[in-house]
Amino acid sequence: MFQQEIDAMQGKVVQQFFSPAQLAKALGIGTTKLYQLFKLEDFPKPTTNPHFKNKYNFQEVKAWIYENEQ
């Protein structure tokens, strides 16, 4: 049973944490615009995990963008 789930997941690993440069590229915006977003009080903060220093959870950022579309 578990092997079937593992086989189904093959090739579907999605990166969850992005550096600022990777995040800008994934969102299709420039780094200047991204750093403006970082300054907003309610923008998702980077992870506090020392192994992923200064990485942003892509799902949280996408949810924030969806909620704040104008």
Image: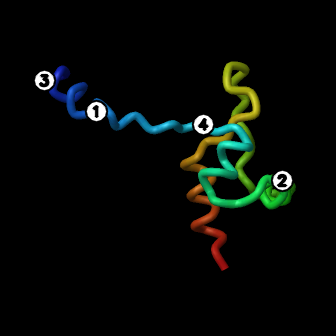
Residue 12: x and y in percent read 34, 37
Q: Dividing the image into 4 quarters, which one contains the C terminus? A: bottom right
Residue 61: x and y in percent read 63, 53
Circle nearer the N terminus (3, 4): 3
User: Farthest bottom residue?
Assistant: 70
Label 1: element kind: helix
The local crowd at label 4, few if under 14, some if 14 to 19, many if 20 or more residues have their Cα within 10 Å, is some
The residue at which mark 3 appears reads as 1
Residue at image location 84% in from the left, 57% down from the top: 32
What mark, if any, has residue 17 been given in the picture? 4
Residue 52 picture quarter: top right
Residue at image location 66% in from the left, 70% down from the top: 68
Circle nearer the N terminus (1, 2): 1
Label 2: element kind: helix
What mark, if any, has residue 9 been given in the picture? 1
Q: CA distance from mark 2 to mark 3?
A: 45 Å
Label 4: element kind: strand
Residue at image location 76% in from the left, 33% down from the top: 54
Question: 59 left or right of 49?
Answer: left
Kind of residue indicated by mark 3 = Met
User: Farthest left residue?
Assistant: 1
Kind of residue indicated by mark 2 = Tyr
The residue at which mark 2 appears reads as 35
Circle nearer the N terminus (2, 3): 3
Q: Dividing the image into 4 quarters, which one contains the N terminus? A: top left
Question: 24 left or right of 3?
Answer: right
Circle nearer the N terminus (1, 4): 1
